[in-house]
Image (cartoon, rainbow, N blue to C red):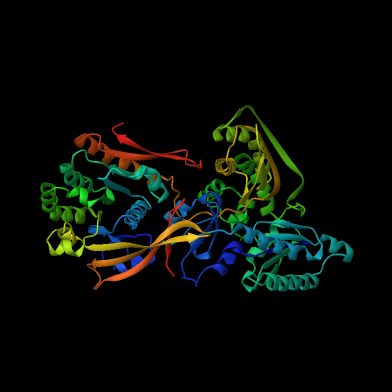
Amino acid sequence: MPPAISTGFLQLDRITGCAGVPQGGLTLLSGPSTSGKSTLAFKLLAHAQHPRGAAALLDLRHTADPDYLYRCGIDLERLLVVRPRRADESAALLLDVIQSQRIRCVVVNGLLELTAERRLERLFHSALPTLRQVARKAGCAVVILAEPTLRWHRWLNLDNAAIERQHAALHIDLQREDWLYRNQELVGYQARAQVVKSLWRRGSQTTTIAIEFNGVVRARDSW
Amino acid sequence: MGILHCSTPDFLATLAQRNLPAPSGRPFALVGEGELIWAVSPLAQIYGIVPDMPARQAQARCRDLLIYPLDLAESEAQQQAFLAELGRWELPIEPCGWGAGWIDLHSLSTQRDGVRSEEVQKLAADLGGRMRTRLGADLTPRLGWDSSKFVSRVAAHAAHTGAMRLVGKAEESYFLPPQPIALLPLPESALQQLAWLGIGTLGQYAALPAAGVWQRWGKAGRMAQDWARGKDNRPVVSSLLAAPEKIVVELDPPTERVGRVVADAMQVLSPVLARLAQDLRGVRCMDMRCGFITGPDYTQKITFVEAASDAARVQAALAQQLGKIIWHDEMERLELQIVETGELSARQLTLFAPDHGSEMQLATEVAAEVAEELSVRYGHVVALGQVIEPLHPAHDCIWKWQPL
């Protein structure tokens, strides 16, 4: 079992098979908007920084909010936020960040921007084997956030994430289930996390995680 | 011998555990105002999580930590019930934090030529039984008895749950020396320095030269040394001040900026806190009253999880409370009234390096180096974050694009 970075959710760590997200491997986090994949990724970055590590966020959507990242527990002074000016330099930037061998975890937000055009898609897919090799050598966890793929997209060969899923050592799919209320006040939401693929576990496993808003982003086991 | 110390360890955590779902065997902490830890479960204490720590820092130390909100009203109600049981004999009592307090038995000794240990044991059994009945079996107290407050507290610490430890004057000479020095309410920096000097017990601290202790740690350090030697003449007094100290800050000209109000208030409050710290005491509860140019005054009670004498801690609490209220006009006056004080709590040495250690600095430099290398190659595409005024409730987080 490789060294891993905790997701911050004990139940989720248990079902990944490697006690979290593997260092030196590719992890795919898929889910629709507001499913919690960004929050989960940010909590991963916070755990990657503990106790003394640096992390990076490839912010292709230019939506990284420093206040929310801070509230997720990230030390902003040890977080690199990278926003490529041109889409075709994203893959090269990502490789350079990992090759520095000083970054413990990189989150790529999101896969849709990385493969927006056919040309960019081919570029990134051709860089994937090198990416895996470099990440393995550097011991860096690479986490890619992706939109979910509908079944009919796969039937019609319109699945953009098929190759990434093949290369990923771990694939977690998130679906928001319910909003959480306390005294009629919205305090967070509950999401279903399914480990679709794991190199260290057979079959697919599901668990529920609860994320609370306001102030510190708190992880709760579901009961 | 005339002072009985009664303490219920992990009072708040045990109360909270009653309302939690089926125990998951995971460490948990209770978070109160300002996202600070108020209480920690015994399992979480192993990770070095202590009260008054920011919740972020606690989560970074323990990945499995569960965080629950503190029900302050329920906790205060149970604390009042605890104090009511302590005061059932109509003797002077002094609270010492959540679920702990002293009872002065000297009035019994003057009547009966010294309280005998058999009588105190009967009193202790009665007190323990009443506590178990009123508060529940999970809040069974530990009792300690001696002629001074500090030694009775140490004796209670050494006792098992549901038991009492009696220490006499003759026993103090061999009971106190082996006890850990972390039982003294010294600041963490002083405990660190003592740890580096190889001083870990009360006996070793008591053996230090008095002049050196005074020079290094001032009056507070000397007072703590006297306690370590068994010389503690403090009487048991109610922590509620008979004449609460009132501090009035006139804001001229009136202002609507929280920063200025806090700065002016701390100018007046800092000497008071320093004076309390010299006596190893701190503020436990404070009333705040804000006077605006127009409209009604706003009052708020500020409660600290432990007695606070650190100016930064009090400043953060003030800033947080002032940031929460709705300012319908400029503020022209701020009144602060210290209602309750208490003995500073004994800080434990934490097990892990603090967040501002050299290793964190190294990681920050690493991030800056990587950012510089990438920016040389790709231009202004890399940013590092910065938090401006992290203690302020409305702190600002910004990106700093490299190169600057």
Q: Quadrant of the N terminus of chain B?
A: bottom right
Of residues B400 and B175, the one drawn nearer to the viewer in this rendering? B400
- Asked whether, in this view, residue B332 is left or right of residue A128, the answer is right
Of residues B197 and B113, the one drawn nearer to the viewer in this rendering? B113
Q: Position of residue B83 (x, y in %)?
A: 72, 61
Q: Position of residue B5 (x, y in %)?
A: 71, 62
Q: Is residue B306 above or below residue A200?
A: above
Of residues B273 and A82, the one drawn nearer to the viewer in this rendering? A82
- Asked whether, in this view, residue A119 is left or right of residue B5, the answer is left
- Asked whether, in this view, residue B67 is left or right of residue B339, the answer is left
For the question of whether residue B67 can be seen, the reply is: no
Q: Is residue A119 above or below residue B128?
A: above
Q: Quadrant of the C terminus of chain B?
A: top left
Q: Position of residue A61 (x, y in %)?
A: 26, 45
Q: How many marks?
A: 0
Q: Residue at the spot x=35%, y=51% of the render?
A: A49
Q: Is residue B23 above or below residue A115?
A: below
For the question of whether residue A208 can be seen, the reply is: yes
Specify the farthest residue to the right: B111
Q: Position of residue A142 (x, y in %)?
A: 24, 54
User: Within the image, what quadrant is residue B276 found in?
Assistant: top right
